Image: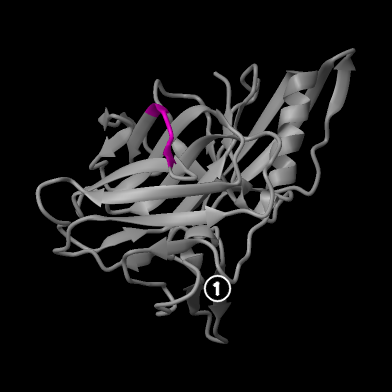
Amino acid sequence: MAVTFYSNMFNYAGFSAAAEPSITVQGYACSGAETTGPAYDLVDGRRTNVITIDTNGETGAFTVDMDMTSVPGAGSTFGIIDNHNFNTAAAEIKFTYGGATTTITTAYEGALGSALAASTVTSNVVQEPADGILLATWSALQVQNYEVSIEDDGSGNFSADVTMGEWIIGLAITTSTGPELRSNERYMYQGINVLETDGGQKFGFSKHTSPQRQWQLKWIHLTANDKSNLEYVFNVTRGRKYPFYIDFGLDATPRLYLVRFMQDDLPFVKVTEGSYGLTINVEEEI
């Protein structure tokens, strides 16, 4: 099965970090306790840093807005909101641009690293998606300003403060073929240091407690279009600089992981005219 890359065009297109993203109507608190200024937690590439919007017991809607400094020529075909609590907060979500509602083609919800379930979408509004990650797709848009409108479910008010960890918009890239060597997976604990006393006793220390995975993907045949598309992904992420979401295509519905390239180049090997081989390595973000 083919592999799909979901990279974030916000940094690629550019935006004012002093002002964007912005939240209107509702008060909020960033992970660093700031209650004014940009909602930086949503675009810092770290899903565990969440912003908290003061909605508990309140009614109505609020908007998260991103005004970019340019319009990426490739446009966008998807939006992802990760590490959210929309179901707990009884929230409904729609994606908009310049105030116009985006026509959602598909929407999926669930947990990062698990096969997602189809969301309930009514009139392009996603109805109380399960806490975790939300993926919505649409026909290509070439616009400069995007918004997410979040409203109560119509029962009267939000059931909790809304929290969100990461918001990305971008162009989904799917390879024409799957890799011949797929998910040559390593499962490991990193950042561990073991010290030994003069008496031979050992003490282990770790920087983090979660396991981490790495995958190697090797294609023997990619088309010239695949080559161009993967170069686009690599440009959007600036190589290893920014993380991105990936679906290895092993399930009937998307199964997303947040990863980062482990290399500074894309070593294409020309096999025949218009045909290329490639090996890439990605590492899970924890």
Give the residue drawn at x 70%, y 28%. 218
59 left or right, relative to 189: left
The image shows residue 157, relative to residue 282, as above or below, that is below
The residue under label 1 is which amino acid type?
Answer: Val
Residue on which disc 1 sits: 194
Give the residue drawn at x 40%, y 44%. 112
Question: Considering the image in quadrants, where does the N terminus appear?
Answer: top right
Q: Percent x, y for residue 270?
A: 88, 22
Q: Is residue 82 visible?
A: yes
* Count of numbered marks: 1
Q: Percent x, y for residue 152?
A: 20, 51
The image shows residue 76, relative to residue 235, as above or below, that is above
Q: Is residue 105 magenta?
A: yes
Magenta stretch: give its range: 100-106
113 left or right, relative to 260: left
The image shows residue 38, relative to residue 286, as above or below, that is below
Give the residue drawn at x 49%, y 45%. 98
- Main secondary structure along the magenta-highlighted residues: strand
The extreme left residue here reads 155
Q: Percent x, y for residue 280?
A: 71, 37
Q: Is residue 113 visible?
A: no
